[in-house]
Each structure stands twice: as structure tokens, then as C-alpha cells.
Amino acid sequence: MSTTRAQPDNYVVIGNPIAHSKSPAIHARFAELTAQAIDYQRLLAPLDSFVATVQTFIASGGKGANVTVPFKLEAFTLATELTPRAQAAGAVNTLKFDNGNILGDNTDGIGLVTDIIHNAGYSLRGKRVVLLGAGGAARGALLPLLQEQPAQLLIANRTVSRAQELLALAQEMSNGIDLQACRFEDLQGSADIIINATSASLHDDVPPFSPTLFSPQTLAYDMMYAAQPTAFLRLASSHGAQCRDGLGMLVEQAAAAFALWRGVRPQTTIVLADMRVAMQARS
Ligand code: NDP
């Protein structure tokens, strides 16, 4: 007797470039672990045709998409409905298509916070948190960080006016949290958690803050991930801090997108371990 299997639902990650994306491997593992029938592929969109690429995918029956560089702002504009965290981030990394509706979400910040709390085991509540950088990733992290009620959030950036813009946003979102914005050079004292959301690590560089921020109790978190520790994590380690890179953030933001699409949250621990092994093997 032959059985017919249901056609999988189609999802993509859209970007330019896109060949490097680890998202198809992550979502394939999630689908396996949760017994969900999905097909998830990379989709290269021409730089001037993001909207047309999404619309063609929707017309072909696509159910959802992850969106990466450089299209997160266009995805924000394209969405017909936004989650509060997408609204706060001003950018969208997850789209869900449903009967003509395009829901836009941003799971980057919740991915970061989930990795810090559940995988690294650090609470943010009542802590002194330093956020380095004021670009898209820092902005996306703002609301999920503030929702954890740290005692203090210091935002430092090379272009201080951008840190001040984030500070103004944070002031609209938070209640009773000490918020400050400054240059890297003006950061003082030690931090409980210091998050590098600059792209300096891409150039093996470290922003010019004082290493007195690090103590043996500090969690130093670099949103960037690589087979070898980044310059930021090497510096943190040399000052005795606990170190973590952004691979867990990547896996957790994917899990939040998967949960939005499928209504089921995948187990991430095993997937994160698999991704770590695969990344080391390729290096
Ligand atoms: P943006 O381009 O939006 O922002 C870059 C930020 O880095 C700005 O604050 C910029 O400062 C600062 N910066 C750039 N170069 C330097 C430098 N040499 N020294 C000090 N500051 C510098 O990038 P994103 O916010 O999108 O990404 C930031 C990082 O986060 C990247 O490393 C990216 O890979 C990582 N990321 C990781 C994710 C994950 O899932 N793990 C998800 C998303 C991002 P200025 O304003 O002065 O230009």
C-alpha cells in the first residue's frame, strides 16, 4: 500500500549575498526535531528587487521568509502588520505570509536575550549592562534587553549622536532603568554584561573602551561569531571575563522565527552544539 506525504510548506532566507547563510541548516534541524514538513532554501534577491522577489515567492505559495543584509529596512516597509519588537527595532528579519497579510517580526534581539539567559545562564535583571554599538543589531536588541529590567544600560558608540538616538528610543520604552549614552572612551567602572554590537570584529578590531569594564564576573558577549575567538573576546578573556559569541543568538533568533511560523518551539541546545561542531570543522 502506498502512502502520500503532505507537500512541505516553503520558507526562504532572502539576502544579498546569501550563499554563506547558515539558516537552511538550522531550520532543517528544527524541522527534523519537531517533525514539521517544511522546505527552507536560500533566495538571492537582486539589490534593487527585494519587494518583487518576495512577491514572486508569495505567489508561488511561500509561507514565510527570513530577511538578512541589506533588506531588513525594506522588509519593515513591506510588512502590512508589525509585532511590537519589530516596531521597536525599526527593522524586520522575519516575515509570515497569510492570506494577503504580511506580518513582520524582528527576532534578533530576543535571540540575543534568550541566549544570554537560557544558554549562558546569566540574568540581566538588576545588572549593569553595556551595549557597544548603535547600528541595526543594537537597536533590535534594545526592547528585549530593557524588558529584562537591568539596573543600568549604557549605550556607547563611535558616532555618539547615534548612541544618543538609541538612548531617546530606550527612554520611550523603559521605566526606572538608568539609561546613558556616551563615547567608548567615556565608559567607566566594570560591567556585569558587555555586549559588542559593533561590526569592529569583522575587521579584527576592538572599540577603544577601557578594559577595566571586564572583571571575572563579567559576561563579554560578541554578536559576531567565528571559528576562532574575535578580537573583542580575546581581550575580554585576557582580563578574566567570561566569553560568549553570537552563534547562540543566531540559533535562538531562528528558533523564534520557527515558532512564529509553525507554532512550535524547537529544542535549540542540540542544534547549537551541531552548528558549533560544523563551524569548527570548516575552519
Ligand atoms: P551596522 O552596520 O548597522 O552597525 C555597525 C555598528 O558598528 C555601528 O554602531 C558602527 O558605529 C560600529 N562600528 C563599525 N566599525 C567600527 C569600528 N571599527 N570600531 C568601532 N565601532 C565600529 O551593523 P549591524 O548592527 O547589523 O551588525 C553589528 C554586528 O552584529 C556585526 O558584527 C554582525 O555580524 C552582528 N550580528 C549578529 C547577529 C547574530 O545572529 N549573531 C545578528 C545581527 C548582527 P558608527 O555608528 O560610528 O558607524
Image: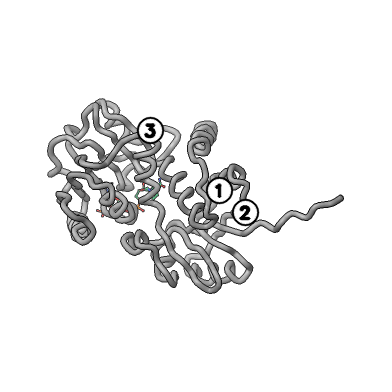
Dot 2 surroundings within 10 Å: few (below 14), some, or many (20 or more)? Answer: some
Residue where numbered disc 2 is placed: 38
Residue 236 versus residue 70 in the image, above or below? above
The label number, if any, that marks residue 78 in the structure image = none
Ligand 1 within 8 Å, label 1 CB: no
Residue 132 versus residue 239 in the image, above or below? below
Q: How is the image coloured?
A: one colour
The label number, if any, that marks residue 229 in the structure image = 3
Q: Is residue 219 left or right of residue 48?
A: left
Residue 173: x %, y % from top left: 23, 59
The label number, if any, that marks residue 27 in the structure image = 1
Residue in view at x 42 percent, y 69 percent: 81
> Is there a contact, CB below 8 Å, between mark 1 and mark 2?
yes
Residue 36 versus residue 214 in the image, above or below? below
Quarter of the image holding residue 70?
bottom left
Q: Amino acid at mark 2?
A: Ile
Gap between marks 3 and 1 measured at Cα: 25 Å
Residue 42: x %, y % from top left: 57, 55
Quarter of the image holding residue 119?
top left
Ligand 1 within 8 Å, label 3 CB: no
Dot 2 falls on a residue whose secondary structure is: strand
Residue 257: x %, y % from top left: 48, 54
Dot 1 falls on a residue whose secondary structure is: helix
Dot 1 surroundings within 10 Å: few (below 14), some, or many (20 or more)? Answer: many
Between circles 3 and 1, the one closer to the viewer is: 1
- Residue 208 seen in this snapshot: no
